Image: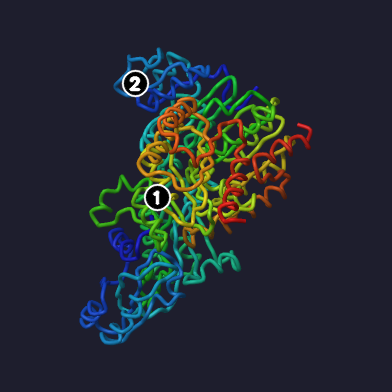
Amino acid sequence: MAILCDKNSKVMVQGITGGAGKFHTERMLAYGTNIVGGTSPGKGGQSVSGKPVFDTVVECVETTKADVSVIFLPARFVKEAAIEAIRAGIKFVVAIPEHIPIHDMLYVREEAVKAKATVIGGNTAGVMTPGESNLGIMPDIAFAPGKVGTVSRSGSITYYVADTLTRTGFGESTCVGLGGDPVLGSTFGEILWKFEEDEKTKAVVMCGEIGGVYEERATEVIRKMKTPVLAMIGGIYAPPGKRMGHAGAIVEGKMGTAKEKLDILAEAGAYPCRTFLDIPKTLKKLGV
Amino acid sequence: MRLYEYESKQLFENFKIPVSKRFMAKTPDEVYSMVENMVGPVVLKSQVLTGGRGKAGGIKFADGANEARTKAKELLQMKIKGYAVNSVLIEPKLAVKKEYYVGVTLDRANYKIVIIASGEGGVDIEKTAVDHPDKIFKKSLSIKENLYSFDALLLAKKIGIPQPLLKESASIIINLFELFKNYDAKLVEINPLVLTNDDKLIAADSRMSLDDDAVFRHVDLKEMGIETRHEEGEMTPRERQAYEWGIPYLDLDGDIGMFPGGAGFGIMGNDFIHYFGGKPANFMDSGGGPSPERIAKMLVLLDENPDVKVIFGARFGGISRCDDFAKGVIMFLKEHGLSKPMVMRMTGNMWQEGVRMFEEAKKENPELFEHIEFHGIETPIEEIAKRAVELAKEERGQ
């Protein structure tokens, strides 16, 4: 088992004929990802890496039974692409591009919640279930099948954490790049709970960042979890940043510093880590 | 992207939110000639991209053109939280009976748009939110919902708008919401919304922050002269250089030059250096999928910084491929040359290709590589960070 995707996932790529779409479709296929086709409006009937290209997601789903979509399109087209996928019945959408307009993501989130679909991103490196499915741009070299789940705002941090877990023999069940954009398709809490329900995942590493309130909001879920959660927060020594204005502070309360976030997560039962090497040490202590 | 008050007030006016008649001036003499033609006392407001301007003395009142010129001169010499005052907005001074607050913003954690209103407007609204949350009223909406006039009327009633002005204030709230949605805003704020002695409502101050990633679809802003700008106040010469090159960069006070991949490890790499007893000289972010030219420029920034004693390089190729990275480093070595030690680790997508390129270049010009300690995936990044701290100590002669 894994979360979100495995070897049986039927994966399609939106924007499969573009430069990044083509390049990463080949990489994902080379990893063994079950890619069944893709879309590129106006280019239906062509093929990329031997996989059929359709004009619309509905057609792609009808023919290939795709149930996961990875979006490789310029940010401004992601809103429509994601909504198209969700309305065609796709239950898991990975939005790779960065700089997706915030209001667009609010629309996408509305659609996803209504259809009980999961959207990951934007600005994500993707989702990887080692040995089974690589959705996005994550470098294979860091990963090996195993028992620890990871969820992180940043791509490079995901790679470093996986690299550390791989080197120390723990391996990863699934690695989720939550995304670095200001408004994301999914929350830490939602992904953590999927790991909680996954039998293969024996512990989860969550990596957050200074700014926003996403990490703090995960505490409700962490308190309910039996699977141990290890937490890292980037920006402990960051120079003090700028804020958005009064209304932001009124709605989101006091913006946590990285240190405060780490303390809040620890208070909720997470195990704080300061370097990647703290992760295997902590896992050993926990008997994972 | 934050807007200046004079810019957001223009947008307010376009959306039928009442604002005062106003003039912009860039010199004390311009202020003089504007105020000469105005009746009654005036307010001079420094135009800066930061809040807390009033408390910092950035707003002054004047009676007549002479006093206005003197006060404007003071304002135009000021710096407010690092922001130089380059222009002044002139408006008639309002006779204030009461101040309200109305704002629209994002509640990112709940994926909602929130309309916020309070009868306690003015500079201390944040304090009110903490001390008297009962005096702050909110209405949350999804992006797909409309703000109905009955909801706006209820908000207006709750904050104590007088009966004769209820309908007008509800329109103001709705128009503010429409403005927020229309321009992909992150924040629009009237603080204060002033009730004048002659019972008129006027947006005395305005604040707007737009989503940089959506500015492309608002071509009318460009026509108004509102374009993406640098918002972080004063820059050091190196920060300005980096800004011109499109590289997110901050000078810090240490001596280890940080040459990371994306922002994620850019931030955490700084923590690691501190954790192992060193101090970073900068923060930097290569952005996703940087070109070789950009990689080379990042190194130029560090090599030419005399405070940098050693460079700490980290590349875990994802969307940013190792071959492009290696190409950029080699370009820098050939065209510029490295004058200080660099310890780096490279792995990730296309790492074999990156390593091959380094080896070839080294065979050709071994002297270019004499300051570089190169590592691959076999060395944990913590070891690289520790080594950078150690090298910095050696360079300092400790």
Q: Is residue A93 left or right of residue A205?
A: left
Residue B211 - label: 1
Q: Nearer the viewer, mark 1 or mark 2?
A: 1
Residue pictured at 36% horizontal, 48% vertical:
B246
Residue at image mark 2? A55
> Which residue is nearer to you in this view: A278 or B385?
B385
Tell me where residue A3 appears, x and y as whole percent: 61, 27
Q: Is residue A145 left or right of residue B301?
A: right
The crowding category of the residue bearing disc 1, from other C-alpha atoms within 10 Å (few below 14, some 14 to 19, many at least 20), is many
- Tell me the quadrant of the picture where the N terminus of chain A can be found: top right
Which residue: 43% across, 42% down? B287
| Percent position of residue B179, x then y | 35, 55
| Residue type indicated by callout 2 | Asp
Q: Chain of mark 1?
A: B
Q: Residue at x 67, y 35 (%)?
A: A204
The answer to whether residue B372 is above or below residue B38 is above
Q: Quadrant of residue A64?
A: top left
| Count of numbered marks | 2
The Cα atoms of the two marked residues, 1 and 2, are separated by 31 Å
Q: Position of residue B138 (x, y in %)?
A: 51, 58
Question: Which dot marks residue A60?
Answer: none
- Identify the image quadrant of residue B295: top left
Residue A110 makes an appearance in the image: no
Is residue A156 among what the camera can see?
Answer: yes
